[in-house]
Image (cartoon, rainbow, N blue to C red):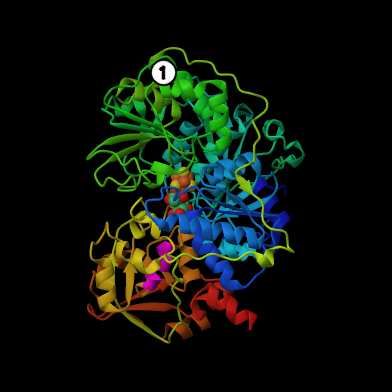
Amino acid sequence: MGYTIGQKLIKEHLLEGEMIPGTEIGIKIDQTLTQDATGTMAYLEFEAMGIDRVKTELSVAYIDHNTLQTGFENADDHRFIQSVAEKRGLLYSRPGNGICHQVHLERFGKPGKTLIGSDSHTPTGGGIGMLAIGAGGLDVAVAMGGGTYYTTMPKMTLVRLSGKLSPWVSAKDVILEVLRIMSVKGGVGKIIEYGGEGVKTLSVPERATITNMGAELGATTSVFPSDEITKQFLAAQGREEDWIELKSDDDAQYDEIIDIDLSSLVPLAAMPHMPDRVKTVEEIGKIKVNQVCIGSCTNSSLADMMKVAAILKGKKIAPGVSLTISPGSMQVLNMLSLNGALSDILSSGARLLECACGPCIGMGQSPNSAGISLRTFNRNFEGRSGTADAGIYLVSPEVAAASALTGVLTDPRTLGEMPSITFPSKFLINDNMIIKPASKEDADKVEIIYGPNIKPFPSSTDLPESIEAKAVLKVGDNITTDHIMPAGAKILPYRSNIPYLSNFCFRQCDEKFAEHCKQAGSGIIIGGSNYGQGSSREHAALVPLYLGIKAVITKSFARIHLANLINAGIMPYTFANPDDYDKIDTGDELALIDVRNKIINGDKVYLTNKTKGEEYELNYDYSDRQKAMILAGGLLNYTKNNSK
Ligand code: MIC
Ligand code: SF4
C-alpha cells in the first residue's frame, strides 16, 4: 500500500512507535521556531535543561508578538531571547522583521523537513511541503536539545481540489469553506492533505494561507505537495537548492476524502465569535463596518498586499472605516515600497503598522465599543481583539479591501473586474534583520541577560496518592486558550511572569477565578468538548498549575493544550459518560481516590463527587511516557529524574 505525503514525512522521521493512528509516535525534528510571547518561557525551560547548544539543523527565535514596548518588560524579553540565541546557536529575527510564519516560509522552510514551533500556526510551513506542527514551548525546548518530539499518529484526510478559483475569490475562501464543512473540532487527530488537479492553480503563499488556518480545524497539521510551483517559489527566494519533490503515492489510502470544486467557491466570512461560523458574504449582507485590518500570518504575503493595493489604487476608504495594513515581513514591505504599491495603499487612507502580529493578538487597534471589524486574520474569539463587545469577521484580503472602500461588508464581485497584478519572479533578499549566533568558541563569552520581569516558571511535585479538590470552575464547549489565559496589550508583556499573569486567568468566564483558586489552595476544572482550542501557549497550563489546578475533566480536548497540560503535570481526563458533565456544579467537593496507583496499574479512574454522593467513570489514554510525566509532576521533573 502506498503512502500519503503526511505518512511519508512521518516515516522518514520516525524514531519511536508505529504509524498506527491514535498511538504515540516519536519523530525527529529538523527545525524549530519560537516567537517571543511563548519564547521566553521556552528558553527558560531550555536553560533549565542545561544544554549548551541547540542540536537541530536550524532553530530560529522570532520577535513578532510583543513589539509594543509600553514598559521595559517586552524589551527585556527581547534582550533575553537575543542573548540565548547568540549563546545557544539560534538565528535571531529582530522585531520588525516580520511574523514568524511568513518569514520562515520565505527564508528557511524546506520541503521534506520537520518543523515544530511554539505557535499554533506553525503548520503554515505545510504550504511548502514541510511537516510543520505547533507545540508547547517545553516540547520545542526538548526538540532544540535534540530530543524526540512525541505526538499521536494522526489519521489522514484528503481535501481533493478541482477547478480554479474565480476572480475575487481566494485561498482564504478555500480554508473558510473547509472550516464550514469540518468545524473547529473537525481536524482533531488528523493531517489535512491537499491534492487533486486544483492544487496546481494555487501559489505557495495561497497554499500557506490554507495550511495556516488548518490550525483552526484543530488538525495536527496540513500539507501540500512540493511541486514545480514550490520550486519556482524557492527559486524566487534564491533557494532553489532547498527544493525536493513530494507527492502522495497513487495508491495512498486516506481515512476521509473531502471534495471541493474551487470554481464553485464564492467570497465567504466567518462570523463572530468562531472561525467555523462561515456564511457567504452575500448571505450576511451589507452590515456597517467600523474597522478593517489586513495582515497576520494568514494573509500578509506580497501577493495579498499587492491585491489590496490594486483594489485601493486611486480610491478613498469610507470615512467611517479605520483601515490598518500590517505586511507579513520586511521583505514584503520593502518590495511594496519599491514597486509603488505601498503608496497606492497609503494614498487611499490606510494606516501602516509594523510587520508583526499586531491587532491579531490584541496588540493595539482594538475596535470601538460594539465595533464591527473585518480582519484577514485566523481567529475571531470573543474579546481577543481587546474590545469585549466587538464583532470580528474573518475575511479574505479582497473582501477586506472592497469593504474598506464602501464602509459596509461587500462582496468584491460587485466591484466589476478584478484588477490584474503582476508578480516578480525574484523576491528582494535582504537578511539584515536576522542575527547569526556566536561561534561555538565565542559562545562562552556571551552572557544571558535576564530582566526583573522574568520570573521562574512554577514547579510541580510528584502526583500524590489521592487528590481532593473543589470544582473551582465549570465551563462549556469550545473554550479557547484565550479564555484560559487571555493575551492583548495589557497582559502580553507579562508572558514571563506567571504569578502576575495568574490574576487574569479565566477572567472572561469568572472574574474572581484566581481569587477562588488561591482561597481553595487547589482545584479541578470541568469543561465541555474541544477544551483548550486555539493557541499553543503553555501559559494556559502553567498558570492553572500555579493556581493549584490538579486535574481538568472535560468531554474532549484540543491537541496542543492536552499535551501542555501533561507537560505541566496537570491530569487531563474525559468523562466516560458525557452526561456526567451535567451532574457536576461549580463548588462541588471532588476527589480522585488512589489515583496514583490506578494510573500506575492502568486501572479505571473514578471521580467521586462528595457533595452529590456520586461517582463518575473517567477515561484517560496516557502513553507510558505520559504516565511517567504525570507521576513525576510534568515533563521537566520527568526529564530531570531520567537524567539523574
Ligand atoms: C495566537 O495566535 O493565539 C498566538 C498568540 O500566536 C498563539 C501563541 C501565543 O499565545 O503566544 C498561538 O497561536 O499559538
Ligand atoms: Fe501572530 Fe496572529 Fe499569527 Fe498568532 S495568529 S502568530 S498572533 S499573526
Q: Is residue 488 left or right of residue 76?
A: left
Q: Is residue 82 above or below residue 525?
A: above
Please provide percent x and percent y for residue 393: 34, 36
Instruction: Please give the range of residues in magenta.
Output: 539-546
Query: Between residues 578 and 240, which one lies in front from this camera angle?
Result: 240
Please provide percent x and percent y for residue 632: 51, 80
The residue located at (64%, 80%) in the rendering is 643
Please provide percent x and percent y for residue 294: 42, 33
The residue located at (47%, 22%) in the rendering is 343
Helix, strand or loop at mark 1: helix
Q: Quadrant of the C terminus?
A: bottom right
The residue located at (23%, 66%) in the rendering is 512
Q: Is residue 570 above or below residue 461?
A: above
State the residue position of label 1: 413
Q: Residue 540 magenta-drawn?
A: yes
Please provide percent x and percent y for residue 372: 28, 35
Query: Between residues 460 and 222, which one lies in front from this camera angle?
Result: 460
